[in-house]
Image: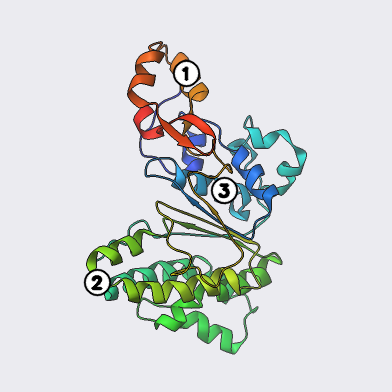
Amino acid sequence: MQRNVALGIQSFPKLRENNYFYIDKTYFIKEWWERGDDITLITRPRRFGKTLMLDMVKTFFSPEYYGRSSLFEGLYIWNEDKYKNLQGTIPVIFLSFANIKETTFSATKYNICSILTRLYSQYSFIASSNLLNRKEIIQYDSISRDMSLECAKEALSCLSEYITRYYNKKPIILIDEYDTPMQEAWIHGYWDDIVSFFRGFFNSTFKTNPWLDRGLMTGITRISKDSLFSDMNNLEVVTVTSPFYADCFGFTEKEVFLSLEEYGLFDKNGVKAWYDGVTFGGNKDIYNPWSIL
């Protein structure tokens, strides 16, 4: 029976629960985990599955999905007992800056603080668990849409500590479209303000955070290390020319042709003529998923 081709879905559980069309990319989990890099930044063009990939990583590791083996059964990552035992055992902090497209720095700050406030609300059970002391409760309650820049810069580091204490495991931090606010800042003239904020934010979150297991960021562009990541010597940057994860984003030609056959479509040369041409690392013939779907 042919699987439904659902467009625009970025939720891994929703794809799997409804048996929608999905090309197995779970081998990314193994490759990323076994490389062991502290912080990984992966840049890819739009519409190549970055958000879905991060949601897949979140779903695999987060205790929220512990015991949900049906989401991964039949996929690559479920072939090894090591990863079956790892599923659902590491807390995950996941945030996206995809919708932060403001014309002023004040509006951008407000939206970032709103994201952090919602994130803290998701973990409100920690604040009421008697694990935090008085000063930590004051810090927790200070997280709001109107908090100071200094408070916002330290927010993820503090939350990492609280989560570590609650789960007795350091969290993974995932950030999707890290560069969207900076693209808007460049266009609208508040570049210096946003770089100053994010330099402190990323340093606190990823460089000086002792409560972090590892981090993964995605984006469209690579921002100059000198301007943004100057203090982060633990950052592995994976651009489109890197050999790492080269076939994890986008569809390979083999995957495209097998998918066409599943739906009784056999004009492979026509599809190749229209959509072939992307190269990631040493992998040629990578296809844009949005176009193929």
Kind of residue sitting beneath label 2: Thr
Classify mark 2: residues with Cα within 10 Å, few (<14), some (14-19) or many (20+).
Answer: some
> Residue 115, percent across and down?
40, 66
Q: Decide if residue 293 is in sight here.
A: no
* Secondary structure found at label 2: loop
* Secondary structure found at label 1: helix
Q: Nearer the viewer, residue 108 or 79?
A: 108
> Residue 268, percent across and down?
41, 14
N-terminal of the pair, mark 3 or mark 2, is 3
> Residue 279, percent across and down?
46, 35
Classify mark 1: residues with Cα within 10 Å, few (<14), some (14-19) or many (20+).
Answer: some
Give the answer, above or below, for where 174 lies relative to 9.
below
At 63% across and 55% down in the image, what residue appears? 63
Kind of residue sitting beneath label 1: Phe
* Residue 104: mark: 2
Distance from Cα at disc 3 to Cα at disc 2: 33 Å
Give the total of numbered labels: 3
Classify mark 3: residues with Cα within 10 Å, few (<14), some (14-19) or many (20+).
Answer: many
Q: Residue furthest right?
A: 81
Give the answer, above or below, for where 186 lies relative to 283.
below
* Residue 257: mark: 1
> Residue 106, percent across and down?
28, 76
At 66% across and 62% down in the image, what residue appears? 213
Distance from Cα at disc 3 to Cα at disc 1: 26 Å
The residue to which callout 3 is attached is: 57
